[in-house]
Image (spheres, rainbow, N blue to C red):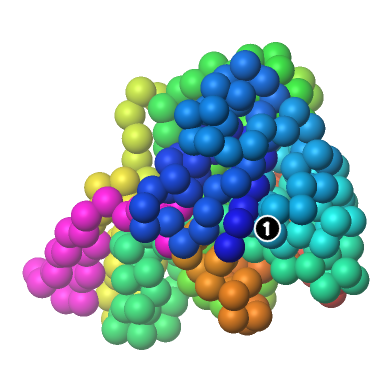
Amino acid sequence: MKVGLIGLGRHGTRYAQHLTEKESPAKLVAICRRDSERGQAFARKQQIRFHQHPTALAQDPDVEAIIVVTPPSLTYPIAKVAIEHRKPLLIEKPLAASGQDARFIVHQASKANIPIMTAHTLRYETTVQKLKESLLSVGNTQYISLTARLEHRPHSPEEIKAWNGRGALLEIGIHLLDAIRFLTGEEIREVHCESPDTRPTHPEEQIWGRLTTQSGIPCLLDISRVSHARTTHIDLIGAAGQIRADWSKGLLSVQRHRHQSEKHSFPKTSTIRFVLQDFIRALKTGTTMPITGEDGLRAVEIAEACYESVTQKQPVSLSHKKV
């Protein structure tokens, strides 16, 4: 399967590294990068084609599928062009910067029968997968606590614009919003969030919230980029025990009795490699994408409701319309 890669920044470079490995499930034949000097240098080194504009890459007859690793404000126009040229898409999370753009992408792809996969890579972390496998062992879920505290990182004016002024929630919290649906198999019916960052042109660095699933499971969010340390974990509390999945440290702990607990450690998960394998496998077999465009849409819609809740200072209900 011959693929084109749009976006070769920090995260896009990770995709490029996997795509140029001997065991890669796909062959990288073309790239598109805004920095043409660096893009052309990479293309020469890998002996592949360089395209200055996404449209040119989408028109490339040798490109069978497109991988998009750009800021979310760019995914809508890129996806539109790719769908017009009937190219399947793997889009790095978040699917888009707004619910409206995400819905358009999914609707147009569905209408044209073009497969889309959203790269919600947290689903591929071994600890998160093991947590899901262990759900029944701790009884009925009482509540879930999800934490992602990453190191502080200043944002350039260009980056702020590329993310439509959004910050920690859309950048890193989107993983947790998708994880709730992944772990519970339910949609979110209500969100109630708060953040000390309310300036419209300033990306939020902290946001907290309570999300409630359709069956009433409370899900507590703690997302920030304010410290110089990293903490990432999901705690699932059941009627007969509790489980913690810490994907940064590769640790899973299960406690079913007061003085008894199980602890397991796992090597670092190569999530991008698994994402690429699943994307290419689904294309070759004609099966449904393991993480669909609609999955990506739902996560963006939840994020949008969280932002609305922060602005309105009250709970916001969600109604998930079918695409």
The image shows a total of numbered marks equal to 1
Using residue 235 as the reference point, say whether residue 315 is left or right of it: right
Q: Residue at x 32, y 71 (%)?
A: 130
Compared across the picture, whether 321 is left or right of 35 comes to right
Q: Is residue 197 visible?
A: no
Residue 222 placed where, x, y %? Answer: 49, 44
Tell me if residue 113 can be seen: yes
* Residue designated by label 1: 65
The N terminus sits in image quarter: bottom right
Membership of 260 in magenta stretch: yes
Q: Is residue 253 above or below residue 139?
A: above
Judging depth in this view, the residue of 26 and 217 nearest the camera is 26
Depicted 215 relative to depicted 310: above or below? below
Describe the element under mark 1 as helix, strand or loop.
strand
Q: Nearer the viewer, residue 143 or 57?
A: 57
**Magenta-highlighted residues:** 252-274
- Quadrant where the C terminus is found in the figure: bottom right
Amino acid bearing label 1: Ala
Q: Position of residue 120 (x, y in %)?
A: 55, 56
Residue at 28 percent across and 75 percent down: it is 241
187 up-or-down from 224: above or below: below
Residue shown at the point (35%, 78%) measured from the top left: 133
